[in-house]
Image: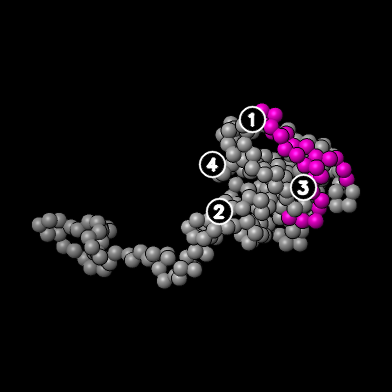
């Protein structure tokens, strides 16, 4: 660092080329400008592609966090639900090459586990703002009447999810859900997952397909 004496043009202030002029406690000085390193500098094309792929999946998962935190819960492994959900969907549902990544919605999951899913699950529109899901009410091995049903409805156009982590119980046999205004008239990707009432076991989530009110 070098001190500056005021000349005819006064003290130097701001950045000029590789130096920065400033003042501290009445003393004017110059110093070298910080070198801003490109975060991609020195990385191979493969490393850059992997990093961008990682960022893409991280961002995609964000609105699903409340669901995957339950659907990928592991009783003996605390606080890793998001990591498990990320790893599964990174390997199974992420397609494309840098920079054109995309999600295979049919392979994406909000839950994974041994609990039974819903039988004869069907989706229908009641109106442009209301959807109805129905299923066969049955219980048995890995299927309890009080299992909780999660409903996640994703709108790609606004990168947002609506629904509920406790939309119904297995014994209810149906869910009637009113869409928030910003989801109306949007193309939707619909998922259902089942978890036990104490949320220690979950089912493999079920994808109901791409839905659009016509």
User: What percent of the width, then of the height, locates residue 52?
Assistant: 50, 60
**Label 1 secondary element:** loop
* Residue topped by disc 1: 129
Residue 9 in view, yes or no: yes
User: What percent of the width, then of the height, locates residue 198?
Assistant: 80, 49
Which sits earlier in the primary sequence, circle 4 or circle 1? 1
* Residue topped by disc 2: 102
Residue visible at 62% across and 40% down in the picture: 188
Nearest the viewer among 123 and 116 is 123
- The label number, if any, that marks residue 36 in the structure image: none
Pointers 4 and 2 in contact (CB under 8 A)?
A: no
Highlighted range, magenta: 112-139
Pointers 3 and 2 in contact (CB under 8 A)?
A: no
* Residue topped by disc 4: 157
Residue visible at 44% across and 70% down in the picture: 43
Within 10 Å of the Cα at label 4, are there few (<14), some (14-19), or many (20+) other Cα atoms? few
**Label 2 secondary element:** strand
């Amino acid at each position: 660092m070098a001190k500056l004496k005021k000349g005819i043009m006064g003290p130097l202030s701001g950045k000029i080329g590789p130096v920065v002029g400033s003042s501290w406690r009445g003393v004017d000085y110059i110093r070298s400008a910080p070198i801003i390193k490109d975060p991609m500098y020195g990385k191979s094309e493969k490393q850059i592609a992997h990093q961008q792929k990682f960022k893409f999946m991280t961002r995609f998962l964000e609105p699903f966090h409340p669901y995957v935190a339950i659907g990928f819960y592991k009783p003996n492994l605390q606080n890793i639900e998001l990591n498990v959900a990320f790893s599964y969907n990174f390997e199974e549902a992420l397609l494309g090459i840098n920079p054109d990544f995309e999600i295979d919605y049919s392979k994406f999951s909000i839950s994974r586990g041994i609990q039974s899913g819903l039988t004869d699950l069907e989706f229908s529109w009641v109106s442009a703002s209301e959807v109805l899901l129905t299923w066969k009410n049955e219980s048995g091995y890995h299927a309890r009447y009080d299992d909780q049903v999660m409903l996640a409805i994703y709108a790609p156009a606004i990168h947002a999810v609506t629904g509920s982590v406790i939309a119904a119980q297995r014994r209810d046999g149906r869910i009637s859900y009113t869409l928030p205004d910003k989801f109306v008239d949007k193309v939707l990707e619909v998922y259902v997952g089942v978890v036990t009432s104490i949320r220690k076991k979950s089912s493999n989530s079920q994808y109901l397909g791409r839905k659009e009110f016509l």
